[in-house]
Structures are given as C-alpha cells and as structure tokens.
Image (cartoon, grey):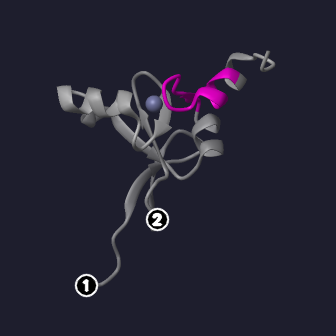
Amino acid sequence: MTGKRTWTLIGADGRPYESTLPGTLGGHRRTKIYGRLDCPGAARAIARGGYVSHRVFFADEATAIAAGYRPCAVCMRDAYRAWKGGDGG
Ligand SMILES: [Zn+2]
C-alpha cells in the first residue's frame, strides 16, 4: 500500500480534480443536485442504474453550491429551503 489513493471531486469552478480525501457529498452532473452520500433518493436511483455514470462528489457543501449545484430536497431539506429563498416560515 502506498497510500496514494485519490478521489475525483468537483471543484468550485465545476471542474473535476484529484483529491487526497474522499468527498463528503454526492451529486448528479445532469440534474445539478447535490446531497448526502447516503441519500435514499440517490440510492434508489443508483439501484435502478444509469445514475452512477453521472455521479460526482464534492469536498463540502460550499464547493457544491459554488459549482452551481442545488441541495437535494430529500436529504438536505434545510439547505434546500434556504436555497429556495424561504425564510423558514
Ligand atoms: Zn438527497
């Protein structure tokens, strides 16, 4: 083992780069939605197939937003509401 494993993440500019740390959030390149790695919605989509080839990963939420992705309404409800411009009412 060399410990040189890297992960391909999406940067704030929307372009992929090699990271020495795995991403903490997943995303879908075509729908431009990001969410938790254990998102039930994403898991269902992956199980159906056709999702994995568009799956991307982010180091953190700020990076995902900067890259133009929006929060998943299923697993990121608070972030999704904030993104929609709601004031929590
Ligand atoms: Zn989700």
For mark 1, give the secondary structure: loop
Q: Identify which residue is drawn at 39% across, 42% down.
A: 38
- Which amino acid is tagged 1? Met
The quadrant of the image that shows the C terminus is top right
Q: Nearer the viewer, residue 3 or 41?
A: 41
Quick check: 28 above or below 5? above
- The residue pinned by badge 1 equals 1
- Which amino acid is tagged 2? Leu
For mark 2, give the secondary structure: loop
Q: Nearer the viewer, residue 1 or 13?
A: 1
Quick check: 88 above or below 76? above
- The residue pinned by badge 2 equals 21
Disc 2 crowd, CA 10 A, few/some/many (<14, 14-19, 20+): few
Q: Identify which residue is drawn at 37% across, 65% down.
A: 6
Find the distance from the CA under tag 1 to the CA under tag 2: 16 Å
Query: Does residue 58 appear to the left or right of 8 in the view shown?
Result: right
Q: Which residues are magenta?
A: 68-81
Quick check: 55 above or below 80? below
Disc 1 crowd, CA 10 A, few/some/many (<14, 14-19, 20+): few
Can you tell me which quadrant of the image ligand 1 is in? top left
* Residue 70 on image: x %, y %: 57, 27
